[in-house]
Each structure stands twice: as C-alpha cells, then as structure tokens.
C-alpha cells in the first residue's frame, strides 16, 4: 500500500472550513436493521435545543487499532475535543479520556506499535500542526505518556505515514529547513532526529510515497495552471507528461513489483476524473474505470490484495458503488441489505488478511455510523454507534435536487426543509467553503449539514448548492468558476437557486438570508454588495472581505502551490489581476450594503485573518450602519471549542429570527448567553 501525499490539499489555496466528521464507533456483532430507535412520539413543531444538535456527548473520528484490541474516538472534554480510548469489547460508558487539552486536539491516528496513538494539534487554531506520540497502559486509569515529536512551534508538520519496515520512523512533511519549500523527512521517534529524504526543489504539490517512505511520483503546479507529472528513475526525475491548463490528477496506488500506478485524472480530453493506470516502464496511460453515468468525478477506490481495483465509487447527489468482481459484489450486496435506501455505504478499506471490511454508513438525518463487516461470518461489528440524540422526525426533510441556472447549466443542490410546512418558507442559502469542495448527502458529511437541520427545525428551508467552481462534477464545471467570484456565475448560481425555490412556492422571496463560512462567508458578503436586494439577512463566518488582502496575508511558502488560485481568482502582483480582484472585493462596495449583517471571526485564523472582518465592520460603523460582530480570541478558521460553537449558533438563530421571522428558542442556558456576550465586539472601538 502507499500513502497519498498532497501539498496542494494542505496548502492555503482552498479556504474551505474543515471539521471532524460526526462518526460513532465498537462492541458486539449486530444486525444493523435491528437498530431501531424507539422513541416517544413528539411534537413535530418542538424546537430542538441547540445543545442537543451540537451535543457534547457526540463522538467523532472512531477508529479501531491495528491489532483490533482498542477503539479510539474524539469527544468534547474540558471544553474541547479530546482523545478517548476503550477496549474493543467495552462500552462507550467505559471509555476514558487520554488527553485533557483546553484547546483540544485536531485529529489522531493509530500507530503500528501496540497501545500507541499519534495525536495532532495546533495552538488555538493557528494551524501550525504538531505531532505527539501517546502511549498508554492496558489499565487506562494509569496516566498515559505524551511525547512531543516535532521541534518548531511555528511550523506546520504534516503526518504522512509510518514505515512498515521500521515503525519507529515516521514520514513527515515540513518546511523548517527552508521556509519557502515543503520537504519530506523521516522522523526517528527514539532520537527525534529528522532526516530530509526528499528536497522538494520541483515544487511538487502532489506526491506518491512508497511503503519505504520515499517519493516515487510527483506533480508540480505550473504558473500557467498546467501540471507536470514526474517519476523517480535511477535517482533521476523524468517527465511522464504535462497536462493542459486546468487538468488535474491525484495519486491513488503504487505497485512496486509491476512498476505501475493508479491515478485519478481528467487529462487528455476527459472532463470527469477517471481511474487511470500508468505503466511507469513505458509511460503508457489507460483507463481503468470511468463513471457509467458520466455524471461525476471518481470519489473513492478500494484495492484488492492483488493491487487491482476492487470497488470504485462516484458521487453525484448520492454515493454510487461499483464492484469489479463477483465476490466483492456479493459481499457489498449483503452489507447493503442491512440498511435502508436512505443510507450511503462507503467501504473505507479492507483488511484482506482478516477478510474484514471497514465501512461508514451515512444517512441524511443521523450521525454517521461505523462498522466492521466480517465477511466470513457475514456479521457486522458495531463500533460504538450511538442512538441519535435527536428524534429524526424533529430534523429536516433532506433531498437532493437539481435546478437550471440562468445560462442553462444544471446545478445539483441539497434542500433541507421542515417536515410539515413546506411552502412559502423563509429561506437560508448556505454556500460551502473552498470553493474547491462540495456538499454531500449525509448528516456528518460536511460542517454545515447539522446547521441545515437546526434551521429546518426552526421553520426555514435551507439550500446548499454545488455552484460552479465546486469539485466533483467534472473539469468544465469547476473551471467555469474562474474569475467568477462575487459577480459571475458562482454567485449567480446562488441567485438562481433562490429564484427557483420562490417560483416553486417553497420560499418566500421577501424572507431570504445567506450564511456561509470561508469562501461561503465571502459569498455572503458578495450577496450583500453585488445583489443587495436579494437578501434580508446575511452572516459571514470567517469570510474574506478583500481578495487582495486575503492573498497578501499568506506566507510566501504557499506561493509555488497557488497556480490554481491565481488562475481562478487572480495574482495581486499582476496589476490587471489586482484591479479585477478589487472589483470583486466586497470591502470596496460597502456603500451598497443595506442587508443586516453578522460577522463571525477567529482571532488566530491564518487563512482569513481578523483584518478581513475588522475592516468591513469598521467601515459599516463609520457610515452609521449596524453590524453584529462576534470574535473568539482563542479560535482559528472555524470554531472548535464547544462553548464558542454553541454560543455562535444561538447568535445565528436570534439574528435570522429577527430578520427573517423563523422560530427562536426562549430557553437558552444563561451560561451560553453570558459567553456569547463576551464574544461580541464593540465596533466603535475598532
């Protein structure tokens, strides 16, 4: 097996928010169809408390250890997300916290060594990720040992893999030797010495790392938005191919014995990302699999023990799986038989030695579930899956829809509505971040799906469009977003979605709001400035107000990896680009704003810095217009601390209720109110 190593995805070219998925996990074999939640009938108009949807007891990132003895997950503890561990046959109530960080952890990964976990965390959202080794005893009441493996607090270390041949060696990406270049290192956990095994002089933004921890394939992003694929051969780097502008590829799998590699790519005239096989002896490229519906890009691949693709998945409005052998088809059909037709089943990986299939099950109205399917016994092993905290009948009715944009382009979107009243509703448009990302079907699939359900419970229709520029629907669809931020088709797709729902009688055109984070926050600001009559309320959550200051705030180390950004948005060092970026920057059109506006910002955000919200709040105050501004001094690009997140949602609820007429809870906990008050900014003092 190999590791996908992508500087491109780690770089700041995408300003989308990330969030741990609401997973659950462990215990005894079950039949999933028997997991019926028996609940007392409830008033379908009852308001679900914010603390119930954004619940502290929800568990995230469930993962079983490589020896199948332990299950780890993350849960709110000490006010932030921390690591818990429980024996595989234990109950959720028996799990104990192994970390107690006030600002939480960002993620973890099981080590190949027994009773050992790697944890990753930054400081209050600054995104300088550090790597720690946590070792624990079989008796979990004994405090674990936590050892910081990385040396420089101002460097972002990327954990790539752990060597099979020597589990004490980690493969790590970092730029501490040269701040303008992200290299690959072998980190000896015993000595903490880091050896540079690949000097990234080519500016690779995507690399394929072998089981030996060495780079075998690399791709750089050229200034003209082309990419060059190179292979390592006899200690030399040889060109395999160069794409056309806008064409992309992603590495999936390397077979050392056959000297072949599988990639996902839209090269050589292809519009959708297909699974391609490269013969590295001859550089010949052939199609291994493509979407039978010609609808979407390649989403996921599971490989067999023979290094051949076994299951290939695509994602349009819902997940579609294609089994490539009769055995895999039969097993997947048996797994699917345990769940209803509202569930999407993704095979994350297969342990071929144990014949165990690790699966995730996504549903529209309950957190993601995780299971291990034992193919030999045809049983599902439950991984601590929790019953829903909220009766699904109180959540929204979520559907995948398609509407036609003004220029004829079909737009796929998700619409979440109250289960009873579904006409003449107040509407919230919720564009995703990135913008090189997309929204999905499942409750736990994206940061804002629980928000959509929360507001549907308050009586709103919530529209999440996969607008032009989004990923997943082909190269042409994504490239249509180039130079279309703010005033082009990316924003027009949102406007057309509003008009579609108004024409259908679903939405009230006089009660339309917009809420977004990161790029979505920019879209909210663009909505108030470039379509000022469309929205009656807008919330920008860590949204940039100036495309120029946004880019100028980023470290120089990212510049080699920003070709896609410069092509799609602009390079402020080029005067014509700078003028175009200024024409799409909401800060330059504040005089047009008449929509009530709320700003939400993390003071430590390295992607969209505080100046982006400060500037627009200052200007609105100077011109005598009201703006609500919430600032968390201990957060970065998206709030992680539970009290900050809940307080912010309460503020959103009250803001939309005031301006759009939706429902609002009158029983908010006093401590939440007090904390929210502490986050509010006096804009007269900016």
Image (cartoon, rainbow, N blue to C red):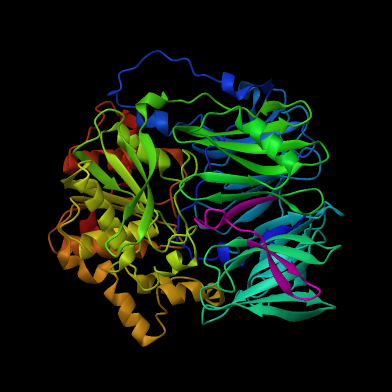
Q: Is residue 14 left or right of residue 325?
A: left
Above-or-below relation of 534 to 667: below
Q: Is residue 661 left or right of residue 369?
A: left
Residue 405 part of the magenta-drawn span? no
Above-or-below relation of 653 to 90: below
Magenta extent: 275-302
Can residue 69 be seen here? The reply is yes
User: Could you say which is closer to the camera, residue 67 or residue 395?
Assistant: 395
| Residue appearing at x 28%, y 65% in the figure | 615
User: Which quarter of the picture shows residue 308?
Assistant: bottom right
Above-or-below relation of 107 to 479: above
Q: Position of residue 57 (x, y in %)?
A: 51, 29
Q: Is residue 394 left or right of residue 345?
A: left
User: Could you say which is closer to the camera, residue 316 or residue 664?
Assistant: 316
User: Could you say which is closer to the camera, residue 409 or residue 37?
Assistant: 409
Total marks drawn?
0
| Residue appearing at x 18%, y 50% in the figure | 536
Q: Position of residue 113 (x, y in %)?
A: 81, 43
Instruction: Name the residue furthest bottom.
Output: 575
Q: Position of residue 659 (x, y in %)?
A: 17, 44
Residue 279 part of the magenta-drawn span? yes
Quadrant (top left, top right, bottom left, bottom right) of the C terminus: bottom left
Can residue 83 be seen here? The reply is no
| Residue appearing at x 57%, y 59% in the figure | 128
User: Which quarter of the picture shows residue 193?
Assistant: bottom right
């Amino acid at each position: 097996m190999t590791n996908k190593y992508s500087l491109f995805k780690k770089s700041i070219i995408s300003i989308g928010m990330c969030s741990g998925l609401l997973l659950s996990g462990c215990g005894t074999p079950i039949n999933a169809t028997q997991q019926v939640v028996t609940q007392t009938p409830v008033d379908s108009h009852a308001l679900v408390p914010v603390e119930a949807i954004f619940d502290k007891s929800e568990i995230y990132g469930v993962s079983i250890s490589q020896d199948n003895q332990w299950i780890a997950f993350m849960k709110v503890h000490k006010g932030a997300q921390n690591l818990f561990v429980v024996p595989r046959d234990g109950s959720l109530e028996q799990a104990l916290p192994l970390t107690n960080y006030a600002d939480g952890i960002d993620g973890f990964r099981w080590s190949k060594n027994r009773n050992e976990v790697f944890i990753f965390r930054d400081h209050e959202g600054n995104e300088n990720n550090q790597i720690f080794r946590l070792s624990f005893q079989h008796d979990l009441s004994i405090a674990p040992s936590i050892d910081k493996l990385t040396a420089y607090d101002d460097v972002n270390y990327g954990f790539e893999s752990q060597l099979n041949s020597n589990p004490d060696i980690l493969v790590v990406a970092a730029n501490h030797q040269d701040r303008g270049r992200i290299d690959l290192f072998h980190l000896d956990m015993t000595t903490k010495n880091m050896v540079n095994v690949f000097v990234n002089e080519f500016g690779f933004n995507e690399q394929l790392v072998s089981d030996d921890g060495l780079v075998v394939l690399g791709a750089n992003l050229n200034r003209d938005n082309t990419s060059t694929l190179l292979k390592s051969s006899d200690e030399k780097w040889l060109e395999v191919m160069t794409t056309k502008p806008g064409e992309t590829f992603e590495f999936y799998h390397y077979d050392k014995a056959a000297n072949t590699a599988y990639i996902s790519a839209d090269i050589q005239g292809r519009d959708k990302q297909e699974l391609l096989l490269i013969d590295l002896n001859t550089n010949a490229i052939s199609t291994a699999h493509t979407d039978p519906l010609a609808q979407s890009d390649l989403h996921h691949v599971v490989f067999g023990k023979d290094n051949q693709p076994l299951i290939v998945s695509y994602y349009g409005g819902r997940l579609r799986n294609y089994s490539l052998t009769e055995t895999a088809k039969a097993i997947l059909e048996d797994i699917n038989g345990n769940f209803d037709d509202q569930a999407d089943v993704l095979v994350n990986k297969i342990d071929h030695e144990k014949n165990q299939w690790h699966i995730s099950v996504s549903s529209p109205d309950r957190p993601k579930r995780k299971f291990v399917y034992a193919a030999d016994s045809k049983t599902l092993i439950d991984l601590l899956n929790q019953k829903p905290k909220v009766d699904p009948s109180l959540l929204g009715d979520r559907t995948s829809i398609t509407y036609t944009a003004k220029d004829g382009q079909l737009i796929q979107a998700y619409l979440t509505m109250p289960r009873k009243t579904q006409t003449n509703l107040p509407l919230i448009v919720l564009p995703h971040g990135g913008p090189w990302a997309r929204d999905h079907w499942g409750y736990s699939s994206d940061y804002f799906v629980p928000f959509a359900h929360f507001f549907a419970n308050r009586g709103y229709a919530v529209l999440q469009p996969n607008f032009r520029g989004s990923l997943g629907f082909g190269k042409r669809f994504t490239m249509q977003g180039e130079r279309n931020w703010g005033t082009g088709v990316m924003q027009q797709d949102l406007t057309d979605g509003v008009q579609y729902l108004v024409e259908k009688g679903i939405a009230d055109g006089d009660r339309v709001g917009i809420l977004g984070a990161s790029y979505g926050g920019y879209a909210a600001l663009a909505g108030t400035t470039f379509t000022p009559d469309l929205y009656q309320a807008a919330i920008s959550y860590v949204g940039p107000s100036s495309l120029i200051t946004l880019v100028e705030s980023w470290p120089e180390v990212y510049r080699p990896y920003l070709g896609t950004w410069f092509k799609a948005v602009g390079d402020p060092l080029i005067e014509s680009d700078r003028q175009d970026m200024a024409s799409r920057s909401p800060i330059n059109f504040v005089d047009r704003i008449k929509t009530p506006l709320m700003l939400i910002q993390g003071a430590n955000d390295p992607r969209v810095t505080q100046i982006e919200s400060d500037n627009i709040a200052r200007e609105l105050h100077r011109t005598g217009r009201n703006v609500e501004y919430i600032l968390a001094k201990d957060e970065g690009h998206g709030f992680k601390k539970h009290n900050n997140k809940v307080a912010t949602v309460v503020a959103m609820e009250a803001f939309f209720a005031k301006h759009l007429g939706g429902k609002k809870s009158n029983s908010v906990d006093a401590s939440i109110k007090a904390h929210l008050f502490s986050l509010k900014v006096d804009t007269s003092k900016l």
